[in-house]
Image (tube, grey):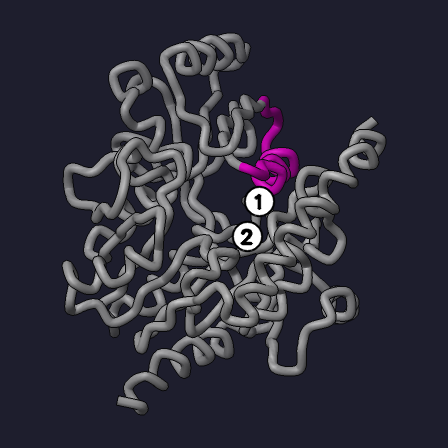
Amino acid sequence: MVKKIRYVLIPFSLLYGGIIKIRNWLFDRNILRSAKFNFPLICVGNLAVGGTGKTPMVEYLIKLLEKKYKVATLSRGYKRKTKGFFIADDKTTSEDIGDEPMQMHNNFPDVTVAVAEERVMGIPQLLYEKPATQVIILDDAFQHREVNAGFNILLTDSKNLYTQDLLLPAGSLRDVKSSSGRADLIIVTKCEPGLRDQEKQNIIQQLKPLDRQKIYFTAIEYKSPFHLFSKKEYQLDGNCSVLLVTGIANPEPMKEVFRDFISGYQILNFRDHHNFNQEDIKQIKDKFSKIDRDNKIIFTTEKDAVRLVKFEKELEKLPIYVLPISHHFLFDDASKFEKDILTFINSFDESN
């Protein structure tokens, strides 16, 4: 049935693809202009709609750079209730800047986290308000060609490579596959931890990178869960029953963790970036109460946690824990990736 629907939608995908190709053609010939900045701008993005691990990659870069540089992030702030340029402070909520920027602000309170619908306007505003900034990481900006970032990192899910996908609405691609040529690095995410070299080579053959492009492979690494409110860490118990509450684009990797390790789990899956309300909280509590075991727990993602935290009064008595994730580079390539990033940033010191 799904395949039949996709076939019906293909003409609309072709129309959408034609529009994107015309837009890219206009940018490639400078009819539409891309702004360049004599400043280290690192763009993290993808060709698909969500689910490739952009936020954990931005956080990986922050951890790499924050001890040496004054780092800032700039996002659109999807589904926030504010408009224009906004810098997070100690009173900021997810409604002000969006869930993913709020997650970064919570995890890295000393890093400047800013949002702006138009990044070409947001960059100079950020540098004006935070003049000590030395590096800006552009979150989810690969398809926004109004800014010509100096270094582009393109992510693709190992289980849904962009070369195997279709354009919206038949598939999940929001940009044409040829746009991958603008990337400096391509990172294949959510790989199996034991990915073999032959499988790696098969993926590289499918992606057909340009000679100048490097490809890296990462797997999801789960960190210690912590309580949503008290922040107390929890040791995962394979004998407990789990209610998994998610509002993310692709919950499958998280489901696999519990499928393989936990004796039993259920899931409440909301739409990506879902704005939880009182009815949702009641649904969570009701479903949890119906799990007929004493040893039971609720897990959610970091992105969902920033939208659930405002319901402390309703949820504080429940064992609700957050399961953080990060990228783990396979084939001992972490140091090579980090060298690529630092080489790019250092090139600005050498040129000035």
Instruction: Look at mark 2 in the image and give the residue it sits on.
Output: 220
In-image side of 300 versus 66 (left or right): right
Residue 317, how many percent across, how many down? 30, 17
The range drawn in magenta is: 249-266
Percent x, y for residue 298?
45, 25
Residue 246 in percent (x, y) is at 50, 30
- Give the CA separation, mark 1 to mark 2: 19 Å
Between label 1 and label 2, give the one nearer the viewer: 1
Q: Residue at x 52, y 25 (%)?
A: 270
- The amino acid type, in three-letter code, at marker 2 is Ile
Image quarter (top left, top right, bottom left or bottom right) of the N terminus: top right
Tag 1: amino acid: Val
Q: Secondary structure at mark 2?
A: strand
Near-viewer residue (270 or 85): 85
- 3 lies above or below 138: above
The residue nearer to you, when weighing 97 against 160, is 97
For image coordinates 27% across by 30% down, the residue present is: 229
* Location of the C terminus (image quadrant): bottom left
Q: Residue at x 31, y 65 (%)?
A: 136
Tag 1 secondary structure? loop
> Is any part of residue 263 visible from this angle?
yes
Residue receiving disc 1: 49
- Up/down of 306 relative to 347, above or below: above
Q: Is residue 144 left or right of residue 177?
A: left
